[in-house]
Image: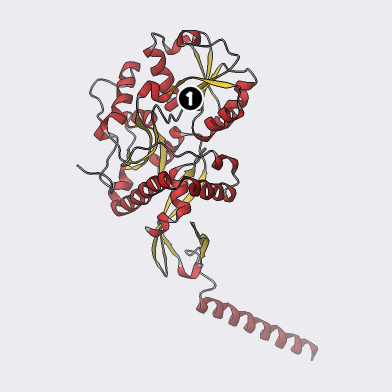
Amino acid sequence: MKKKLKIIITAIVAIAVIGIVIGLILTGTVGSPHTKTTQIQGNSGTQTTNSSNVKTVGNTSTNQSGDFFTLRTPLSSSLAVIDLADQLGYYRDNGIIIERTGTSTGGPQNIMTVASGSNDVGGSAFSAIVNAIAKGTKIKVVVPSIGTSLTEPDYKWLVLNTSSIKTASDLKGKTIGVNTLGAQADFVTRAYLYQHNLTPSDVQLVVLPIENEEQVLRQGQVDVIAPNGNYLKKAESDGGVRALFTDAEVTGDQVKSATFMSTDFIEEHPDIVRKFVNATTRAIEWDKQNRDQSKVLLAEYLEKNNGNTKLAALHNGWAIRSPPTINDQDVQFWVDVMVKEGLLKEGQIKPSDVYTNEFNPYYQK
């Protein structure tokens, strides 16, 4: 009797469990293996779209409010325009979700991951982008990300106040720390040396993580460092350092870093590229008029991503010209440097091979 009762109870529980599962499926609480919960960040906070309303096919997610296309991009080592545009909700407004895939060491790594298809969007200095495209990498710049000018330089080459280095000639035999070889700090250093009748062989270039440059300089392990963005602002605010030269003194006013995608992605998803560029350029211009609000939003972004929120207080924009477009001289300067370095042949590459303003709403022919 007890055995029969036990069997009956077990059957009742099994039926109840099956009923609950069926109910959950019918109400959309339990999804298929192809559904997911997607976090959408905006200035109104984090919104979660329930898995019952989101289907994933390739990069595209669909929810009740429309189609969302997921763009994969690495975390930037410093605050980027993409971070602000995401916080403002501009990508979401254009049907795009930004998915951050991990921290990158810099532009060359970003180029590699976009070219391989691991990411959809990357950022780098034009120097590294030109170098990569010349070697056959299938990427193209679609929107500016950082500018530089004599009044708002992005990079500065810093020495300690007590350093004996006063002019370019004093650099002979000295050690210069840059965040990566083959990118902006490296190539600007080389251009500066050439402009002052020196060569890269006259100095020792060493690679340092940008977040460690200031500490290594203060410990006396290198003679010069080349920080940019918020790391530069922090080093200067900490005191005890002075600038030997700036990137703008070498290059002139220009857009020096940009955001790119693979040429395959651009050809396959032109509408997504246009929406992404629209949202990004809108954020660039919004920041110029709302700097204090930008600092608040960027601090929120850093807090959510376990970053140093103090960096947001140092934010002073990205020094991108208005309108936020790219021109030939932004690229040609680097082509000329690489010809001199022997990395390119004369006429091997032209600016239109590197960038396009086709998707930029601010561009006028």
Q: Is residue 308 visible?
A: no
At numbered mark 1, what does the secondary structure look like: helix, strand or loop?
strand
Find disc 1 in the rendering and name its residue.
156
Q: Name the image quarter holding residue 209.
A: top right
Mark 1 nearby-residue class (10 Å; few <14, some 14–19, many ≥20): many
Q: Is residue 85 visible?
A: yes
Q: Quadrant of the C terminus?
A: top left
Quarter that holds the N terminus:
bottom right
Residue 321: give x, y in percent of width and height: 34, 37
Q: Is residue 270 depicted above or below 38 in this figure?
A: above
Residue 320 vertical position relative to residue 7 in the rendered view, above or below: above
Residue 210 versus residue 281: which sits nearer the camera?
Answer: 281
Q: Residue furthest right?
A: 2
- Image check: 40 left or right of 360? right
x then y, percent, for residue 45: 53, 59
Look at the picture and state if 54 lies above or below 166: below
Q: Nearer the viewer, residue 343 or 275?
A: 275
Q: At which x and y percent is residue 236?
A: 56, 28
Q: Amino acid at mark 1?
A: Lys
Percent position (x, y) of residue 323? 30, 42
Asked whether, in this view, residue 324 is left or right of residue 297, the answer is: left
Q: Residue at x 71, y 88 (%)?
A: 8
